[in-house]
Amino acid sequence: MKIFVTRNIPDRGINILKEKGYEVEINPEDRVLKKEELIAALEKGKYDAVLCLLTDKIDADVFETAGKQCKIFANYAVGFDNIDIKAAAERGIMVTNTPGVLTDSVAEHTFALMLAIAHRIPESDRFTRAEKYRGWAPMLLLGTDVSKKTLGIVGLGRIGSRVAHHAVKGFEMKVIYHDVKRNDEFEKESGAVYKERIEDLLQAADFVSIHVPLLPATRHLINAERLRIMKPTAYLINTSRGPIVDERALVDALKSGIIKGAALDVFENEPSLAPGLAELENVIITPHTASATEETRQAMGELAAQNIIETLEGRIPPNLIKWVENKV
Ligand code: GLV
Ligand code: GLV
């Protein structure tokens, strides 16, 4: 069996595939392959499986080129908006993701961003490094408390629930949430309150944290109009997918004081940033690294490898993504 890996990943997943006796070919360059390069590689290799990344756009052309012997595209990510699931289903190609193993890392990163923006950590760090610190001062770099504030979770999946858990258990925050589904059990455990209308959440939250997948229905879910509903003292945190927020509208909202601050790990046109975003002091930006811990990136590789092995051995892989018409 031959496996193509579109870009090098931590070694454990690769070793699992090699130990199975599979021939593993890895893109020799540490960069994203252009579509034509990916297609050329697949055409030449006749692979049985592909381990791909969220930076690879996998569409019908790619599946066609991969050929009939190719059984699975295992995405090294929980999100799979980079893959045309319908095109895969039409060709009987399995697509899998890596849920669960990155939940802690992303929830931690979300909280790190929330605390850092509220306590103005990067701004204070820049200030201190620039030798502007002249001694303790009562009014110096005042931030905002996180404890006991209201956190609005948009999207109560694994990651959203984990963030809610930290908020309630660690910071005695009041949690409100918006999702397509209501979760009674979660409400009982956490004391969280469901908001059927996202507007009601935005109006009440001191911190809004986004955890929905990118779908046609969630693109620009946070737009200019909805930013205006938020409190002028509120912060927006996004560790899901960039296009869920209208980034230009966000820059305007941050400049004009419509909201107080934002902390973003994802951007609308990665790796580009909306004009003006990086110049703002009331913003923290990290380069899509919410799952970037040693442990998590290894575990993602192991899970992707497991999905490939199960598929090539004729079983249903544990993280198969099914094509559901009404979901997109
Ligand atoms: C990262 O963004 C992921 O979807 O795993
Ligand atoms: C990710 O797994 C999520 O459901 O939030």
Image (tube, rainbow, N blue to C red):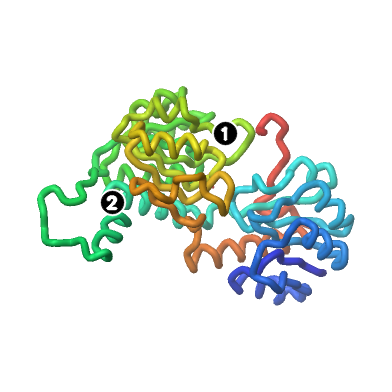
Q: 100 or 257, which is in the foreground?
A: 257
Q: Which quarter of the rendered picture does the N terminus lie within?
A: bottom right
x, y percent for residue 188:
37, 33
Q: Residue at x 71, y 75 (%)?
A: 18
- Mark 2 highlights which residue? 120
Q: Residue at x 49, y 42 (%)?
A: 211
At label 1, which amino acid type do we have? Thr
Which mark is drawn over residue 218? 1
* Residue 191 visible, this angle: no
At label 2, which amino acid type do we have? Arg
Dot 1 or dot 2, earlier in sequence: 2
x, y percent for residue 62:
81, 53
Left or right: where 188 falls relative to 224: left
Q: Nearer the viewer, mark 1 or mark 2?
A: 2
* Residue 294 visible, this angle: yes
x, y percent for residue 68:
89, 55
Ligand 1 under 8 Å from disc 2 Cβ: no
Left or right: where 80 falls relative to 140: right
Q: Residue at x 55, y 64 (%)?
A: 299
